[in-house]
Image (cartoon, rainbow, N blue to C red):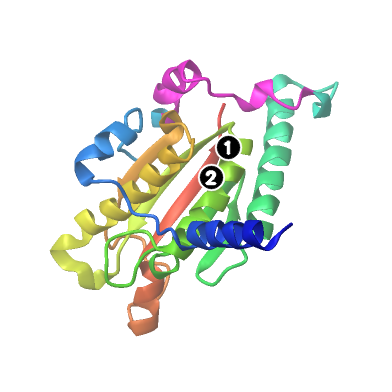
Amino acid sequence: MNLKKYIILSLLLLTTACVQYHSPERSTWSQYLRGASFTDMTETARIAKRPVFLGAGGTLISSIDTSNKMDYGDKVQNDTAVSVNYMTNLEYELYDSLRKPGISVQRAGTDVVIILVRDAIMELNIADISADGADTLNIISKILKKYDATFMEIAGYTDAMADKQAQALSLDMAQRVGVFFSQHGISTARMFIVGRGAARPIAAQDDIGRLTNRRIEIRLVPAR
């Protein structure tokens, strides 16, 4: 490669690396989130959303990876075995790809939960996704597109100090993540988006604990 081409390529790579993601204007969010449900992801809500999910090209657990299904037992047992294997693989891939401060991947039965502390994915003093946050969410997006036989709940949380603004702030975080996913090819037919304010703290309400309680939780559930 000659010097001129090398310089041009280097400048292009540098420019790409420096591009900062910004959430689109709030007035456009409804377009990006069309098809998402703004409610808790209960079993009843998933059942109600299933026709929309399938109509948007969604895949059910029962229709994938049939080569690994057992030749014996009833359908419920076999589907459960497939679900466990599928979600285990999803958990391991997320865990291996998200070894960053402020980010954790946990298992709850067949569900997988990604916990993203606010400061790990958003600007410190601005309500927007940071460069590191965009990198993290892009990694998650790629994995979610691979494991598309899942519903997801994107839930925002604040600390107890947020007071009256807690609900609005937590929903803002959740919607920003949902918009990012939509922009990066994740079907909104899979999404449930909620803001829970200061509910369900996972740490003490001291200075350090409050930083942990400000978070996004992405709960992934097998689509059945």
Tell me whether the residue at label 1 lies in contact with that at label 2, contact meaning CB atoms closer than 8 angstroms: yes
Quadrant for the C terminus, please: top right
Which residue in the protein does label 1 denote? 145
Residue at 43% over, 58% down: 19
* 20, 42: nearer the viewer: 20
Magenta stretch encompasses residue 149: no
Is any atom of residue 25 visible in this view? yes
Q: Is residue 64 magenta?
A: yes
Residue 101 lies, in percent from the top left, at 54, 72
Q: Is residue 196 left or right of residue 184?
A: left
Amino acid tagged 1: Lys
Classify 10 Å Cα crowding around label 1: few (below 14), some (14-19), many (20 and above). Answer: some
Instruction: Report the predominant secondary structure element of the magenta stretch.
Output: helix
**Residue 146 at x, y percent in the picture:** 63, 37
Q: For residue 197, what is the image quadrant?
A: bottom left
Question: Which residue: 35% across, 33% down?
Answer: 36
Residue for badge 2: 141
Please give left or right for residue 162 compared with residue 153 in the image: left
Q: Residues within 10 Å of mark 2 (few under 14, many from 20)?
A: some
Instruction: Tell me which segment is drawn in magenta.
Output: 46-66
Q: Position of residue 184 (x, y in %)?
A: 47, 40
Q: Secondary structure at mark 2?
A: helix
